[in-house]
Image: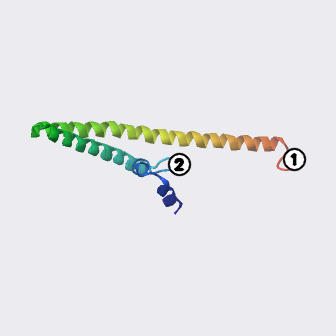
Amino acid sequence: MQEQREHARYSLFRRIFFPYSGGEALTIKQSLRIIIAWILVVPVSMTLLTLVLSLLLGFSPQHIILLALITFLSGMMVFGLLSLVVIATNNRAVRLRQEWQARLRQRSQTAEEDRGGRYGS
């Protein structure tokens, strides 16, 4: 229920491309969902724009197909790699944040023990 409320606050762009809070490492399933979204949504829109422009400029059908294919495949490569960078960056940031919080807790426990416990001695 809480996750649904969080998703409602995100913009449409965010819900499509990265619908997670960034507070925890992404699972394989979540990572695949992000990769697929990035590999399909952006290259398809780029390809459609290329098709429209090619038709308006009066290119031959072979040329249009070649341009659309090159546009789609290059978009898949570029945005697929970018999605991997986003996932790796998110997971690394989460791991660093968790390590930092663990060190803070350990320091506070050590400081508490050095003072003689919770109520002092």
Indicate which label's residue lies in the foreground, 1 or 2.
Answer: 2
Q: Residue at x 70, y 42 (%)?
A: 106
Is 7 located above or below residue 25 in the figure? Answer: below
| Viewer-nearest residue: 102 or 48 | 48
In terms of sequence position, does the residue under pointer 1 or pointer 2 come before the other? 2
Q: List x then y, in percent, for residue 32.
A: 38, 48
Q: List x then y, in percent, for residue 18.
A: 43, 48
- Number of marks in the image? 2
| Viewer-nearest residue: 108 or 37 | 37
Residue placed under numbered mark 2 in the picture: 24
Task: Mark 1 and mark 2 in contact? Answer it, CB < 8 Å.
Answer: no
Q: Is residue 101 left or right of residue 57?
A: right
Q: Is residue 58 left or right of residue 19?
A: left
Q: Residue at x 36, y 37 (%)?
A: 81
Is 97 located above or below residue 9 in the figure? Answer: above
Q: Is residue 64 left or right of residue 33?
A: left
| Viewer-nearest residue: 59 or 32 | 59
Q: Residue at x 75, y 44 (%)?
A: 109
Looking at the rendered structure, the secondary structure element under dot 2 is: loop
Q: Is residue 7 left or right of residue 119?
A: left
Q: Residue at x 84, y 42 (%)?
A: 115
Q: Amino acid at mark 1?
A: Gly
Q: Amino acid at mark 2?
A: Glu
Q: List x then y, in percent, for residue 82.
A: 38, 37
Q: Which label is found at residue 120?
A: 1
